[in-house]
Amino acid sequence: MALSISEKLGYAGLLPFIAGAAAVVLGVEGGEEFFKLYSLLILAFMAGGCWGVEQANPEQIDEIPLELSIGTFLWGLLAYFLPTNVAVLMFVVGFWLLLWTETNPIFKRAYADSYKRLRNILTAAVTLLNVIVFIAVH
């Protein structure tokens, strides 16, 4: 079965995570900052996606997911400025919080099952890469 464009782009989005984690593990100068910056950017992108779904369905907006979208972005922004060992744990919490947010009925209607599977896979992969970076900086 051929991958959809969302799946191709989603998996391609893992490449900078992999490169950043490898740079941290190998001790490449700037690796930690790159990994944290890319984590922040993707977390902000994902939070913005949640915000967009919520804004596209104003009659169904639930305050909690809307606030979690904004709060998760701010959480990630704070994480970026903290030491890497703390930041990566905060990013993991942020990615899982957004995934949990997407269990709200508004998202169940907006997202195809294939996208939900993709999000689960990508969140698990990003979590693993953050754990690798956490271990590498200790």
Image (tube, rainbow, N blue to C red):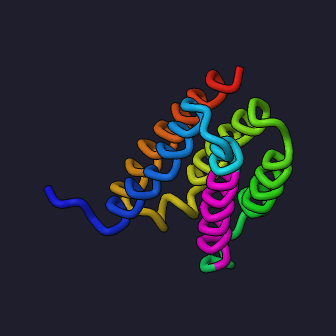
Residue 39 percent across, percent down from the top left: 64, 50
In the image, the segment drawn in magenta is: 37-55
Which image quadrant is residue 1 in? bottom left
Residue sitting farthest toward the front: 29
Q: For the point 78% across and 62% down, which residue is it?
A: 70
Q: Foreground: 110 or 13?
A: 13
Image quadrant where one finds the C terminus: top right
In this rendering, the answer to whether 67 lies above or below 36 is below
| Image location (x, y in percent) of residue 130 | 60, 35
Give coordinates of residue 55: x percent, y percent.
Answer: 67, 77
Q: Main secondary structure of the magenta part?
A: helix
**Where does residue 77 sit, x and y in percent of width and height?**
81, 55
Total marks drawn? 0
Examine the image and state in which quarter residue 135 appears. Answer: top right
- Front position in the image: 82 or 25: 25
52, above or below 11, in the image: below
